[in-house]
Amino acid sequence: RGTLMQGKRGLVMGVANNRSIAWAIAQACALQGAELAFTFQGEALEKRVRPLAESIGSDIVLPCDVGDDAAIDETFAQIEAKWGKLDFLVHAIGWADKQYLRGRYLDTPRDAFLQAMDISCFSFTAVSRRASALMQPGGSLLTLSYLGAERVMPHYNMMGVAKAALEASVRYMAADLGGAGIRVNAISAGPIKTLAASGIGDFSYILKWNQLNAPLERNVSTDEVGGAGLYLLSDLSSGVTGEVHHVDSGYHIVGMKNPAAPDI
Ligand code: NAD
């Protein structure tokens, strides 16, 4: 236990279960004294999220479908009523119709494209606008991305396009909010077996490939993403904004297959 986040209040959006990246970031912040609120999507997830929140002493657990502006407004009205201010926000939300997370990107229909963009990219802009209005200098906003934003990854398709837009939105919001002393960053995480990841075609192959070819010769854990999240949300990173920070065992620097890795 430490005191790095003592006196800071944060909203965590995107916990689905105890394997969620958002949960690992929440735990890392709670261990350093942060006070947390959570949102969940849909009643089915409430019964998973509420006990997790309670286990770290949080009783603010609110429904929020980020595809719905009224729901977002209601969430931030409640945060304002309960806390009056906000120090940090975690947006660990992504979604695309998994029917199109296989095959060719070229075949993505308009509806599926717009929904993926809306939930996986625009929602961070939408929640950041409300969150930053409750923040003082020192505020920090964080989202989650993936290397599929920068390079072509099999099956990632329109999610890669949405993550590229998400990373660009991090830079534009960092510029918008920098004058107010509020920082905006993303973590580009390596592949981790979560609920969201199970929708991606051949995910176990992607995990194996990363494990064999990343400089650290293994995959990352959600706890490691949690630690990086803690850094970006805390004052330790007070000079960092507009950044996409890779937590991927170094996989993003690799240009070719590791010649020592076995064929898979
Ligand atoms: P997860 O399934 O645990 O979390 C995804 C969350 O998004 C869930 O809590 C889900 O309820 C939420 N969500 C989806 N649509 C929503 C909506 N309309 N309104 C509100 N919430 C909604 O999986 P995860 O892997 O922890 O994903 C968190 C983030 O990390 C995502 O942005 C994902 O793209 C990103 N990411 C994941 C990996 C990986 O390999 N798991 C790698 C890099 C980046």
Image (cartoon, rainbow, N blue to C red):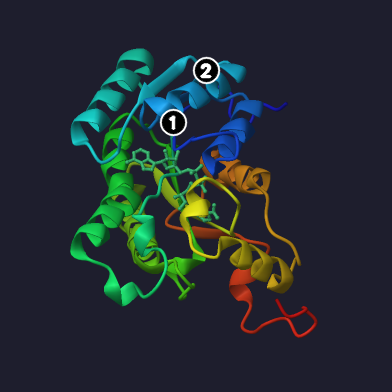
Considering the image in quadrants, where does the N terminus appear? top right
Mark 2 crowdedness (10 Å alpha carbons): few <14, some 14-19, many ≥20: some
Would you identify the image quadrant in which residue 75 lies? top left
What is the x, y in percent for residue 49?
Answer: 50, 26
Give amino acid for label 1: Asp
Quick check: is the Cβ at mark 1 less than 8 Å away from ligand 1? Answer: no
Considering the image in quadrants, where does the C terminus appear? bottom right
Tag nearer the camera, 1 or 2: 2
Q: How many marks?
A: 2
Depth check, front residue: 97 or 220: 97
In the rendering, which numbered label is found on residue 242? none
Give amino acid for label 2: Ser
What is the x, y in percent for residue 210?
Answer: 65, 68
The correct choice, above or below, for 49 with respect to 254 in the image is above
Residue at image x 36%, y 14%?
82
What is the x, y in percent for residue 263?
Answer: 73, 80
Q: Quick one: label 1 or label 2, which is nearer the N terminus? A: 2
Q: Is residue 86 visible?
A: no
Depth check, front residue: 121 or 204: 204
Whole-angstrom CA distance, mark 1 to mark 2, is: 16 Å
Q: Secondary structure at mark 1?
A: loop
Would you identify the image quadrant in which residue 217 lies? bottom right
Depth check, front residue: 137 or 1: 1
Specify the farthest residue to the right: 260
The residue that label 2 is drawn on is 58
Mark 1 crowdedness (10 Å alpha carbons): few <14, some 14-19, many ≥20: many
Residue at image x 75%, y 65%?
216
What is the x, y in percent for residue 158?
Answer: 34, 65
Q: Is residue 87 visible?
A: yes
The residue that label 1 is drawn on is 87
Q: Secondary structure at mark 2?
A: loop
The correct choice, above or below, for 13 with respect to 166 in the image is above
